[in-house]
Image (cartoon, rainbow, N blue to C red):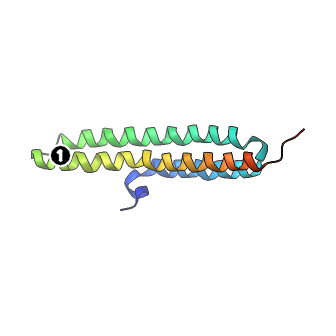
Amino acid sequence: MSLFTEAGVFAYGSLLLFVAGLAVCLRARDRAVSSASAFSAGIAGFAMLGAGAGQRMVDKYIHDVPELAERVLCLSAGTREAQANMVLAGGMILMLMLVAAGISALSPRAS
């Protein structure tokens, strides 16, 4: 199962911000690092919303599961799915910041 399928709708919001952040960094090279920082905060926000909402759904669901062993399995799978948001966002943020740092390092300095 792909991370995007596990993470749900919030992962697509993070992806949209990631692509927009890359575009802004490439377009406004002089402000790449500050732009990447701002978009990274938005990506992290989407990830936290997705992880929190996913974990709340897991908690709500497991109360209806009668067997303890089945509850543990549901809790494990649900938590993995909820945390997929954080895994994806962490990778996106890291890539965005690395691209911005590279752009900043390669850009000629104004004297």
- 59 over 18 or under it: above or below: above
Residue at screen point 63% across, 38% down: 37
> What residue does disc 1 label?
72
Count the numbered circles shown.
Answer: 1
Q: Is residue 53 left or right of residue 58?
A: right
Residue placed furthest toward the left: 67
Residue at screen point 36% across, 46% down: 82
Q: Is residue 53 left or right of residue 69?
A: right
Q: Judging from the image, what secondary structure is the residue with disc 1 in?
A: helix
Q: Is residue 67 left or right of residue 10?
A: left
Question: Residue 72: percent from the left, percent from the top?
Answer: 17, 46
Question: Residue 33: percent from the left, percent from the top?
Answer: 69, 41
Q: Is residue 37 left or right of residue 51?
A: right
- Which amino acid type corresponds to the residue marked 1 in the rendered image? Val
Residue at screen point 58% across, 41% down: 40
Question: Residue 59: percent from the left, percent from the top?
Answer: 25, 39
Residue placed furthest toward the right: 111
- Would you call the spot at circle 1 few (<14 residues within 10 Å), some (14-19), or many (20 or more)? few
Residue at screen point 73% across, 46% down: 105
Q: Nearer the viewer, residue 76 or 11?
A: 76
Q: Nearer the viewer, residue 91 or 85?
A: 91
Look at the image and tell me in which quarter the C terminus lies. Answer: top right
Residue placed furthest toward the bottom: 1
Q: Nearer the viewer, residue 66 or 87?
A: 87
Look at the image and tell me in which quarter the N terminus lies. Answer: bottom left
